[in-house]
């Protein structure tokens, strides 16, 4: 029963079946009977876990057993102390209130690959980077959180899930590696 770490490229759909000529996981992974344990939207990049073990998939993805996930987020604007405090506290997004999380301003990671296509740069508007660590994961939650504090997301890269990270398992977009599943049990 493999556990696959996969670095999902920008604009790749988190499914194996084709859709309107868009790239899917099947364009990168030819491993029978594996399924994503959680999702990333097409506009997001970074670490995904895939497995053929239904119980493990449930454990990783189910809200009662959420593994901590860290997202590196480039935002439009400067993430000041007030914005970071709002991100860390429960934040009302209308249809739900987020759980407290960790949010810190960081330098752009040196190991991060260039995005293709690149982020649109505006000379009159600075950008900054935030590392947000959540133990929940609702649809487009990080993007909604940064927008709610006035810092729209320009780029979102999931860098870690539980004990696995792109720092300890360097993968370029589209690359994958099989690892022992025991670390998540």
Image (cartoon, rainbow, N blue to C red):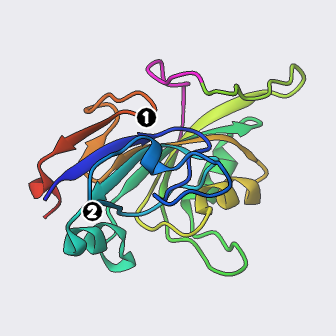
Residue under label 2, please give it.
33
Residue stretch in magenta: 104-114
Instruction: Locate residue 105, reporting x and y percent.
Output: 56, 36
Residue 125 location, quadrant:
top right
Q: Is residue 108 left or right of residue 49?
A: right
User: What is the spatial separation of the Cα atoms under label 1 and label 2, in whole angstroms?
Assistant: 19 Å
Identify the main secondary structure in magenta.
Answer: loop
Residue under label 1, please give it.
174
Which quadrant does the C terminus fall into?
A: bottom left
Above or below — where is 123 with respect to 68? above
Residue at 63% x, 80% y: name it. 96
Q: Is residue 88 left or right of residue 144?
A: left
Residue 149 location, quadrant:
bottom right
Q: Is residue 1 left or right of residue 104?
A: left
Q: Say which element carries label 1.
A: loop
Q: Closer to the observer: label 1 or label 2? A: 2
Relative to the observer, which residue lies in front, 69 or 126?
69
Which quadrant does the N terminus fall into?
A: bottom left
Assess disc 1: are there few (<14), some (14-19) or many (≥20) residues with their C-alpha within 10 Å of its C-alpha: some
Count of labels in the image:
2
Instruction: Locate residue 22, reporting x and y percent.
Output: 63, 48
Above or below — where is 111 with respect to 150? above
Of mark 1 and mark 2, the one earlier in the sequence is 2
Above or below — where is 135 with respect to 20? below
Residue at 31% x, 56% y: name it. 50
Report if residue 105 lies within the magenta region.
yes
* Proximity of marks 1 and 2: CB atoms separated by less than 8 Å: no
């Amino acid at each position: 029963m493999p556990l696959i770490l996969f670095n999902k490229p920008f604009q790749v759909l988190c499914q194996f079946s084709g859709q309107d000529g868009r790239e899917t996981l099947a364009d990168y992974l030819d491993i029978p009977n594996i399924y994503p344990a959680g999702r990333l939207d097409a506009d997001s990049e970074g670490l995904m876990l895939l497995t053929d073990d239904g119980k493990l998939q449930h454990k990783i993805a189910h809200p009662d057993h959420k593994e901590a996930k860290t997202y590196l987020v480039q935002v439009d604007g400067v993430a000041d102390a007030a914005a970071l405090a709002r991100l860390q506290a429960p934040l009302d997004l209308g249809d739900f209130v987020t759980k407290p999380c960790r949010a810190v301003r960081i330098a752009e990671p040196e190991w991060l690959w260039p995005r293709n296509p690149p982020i649109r740069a505006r000379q009159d508007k600075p950008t900054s980077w935030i590392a947000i660590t959540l133990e929940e994961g609702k649809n487009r939650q990080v993007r909604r959180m940064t927008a709610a504090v006035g810092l729209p997301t320009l780029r979102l890269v999931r860098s870690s899930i539980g004990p696995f990270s792109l720092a300890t398992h360097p993968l370029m977009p589209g690359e994958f590696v099989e690892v022992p599943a025991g670390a998540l049990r």
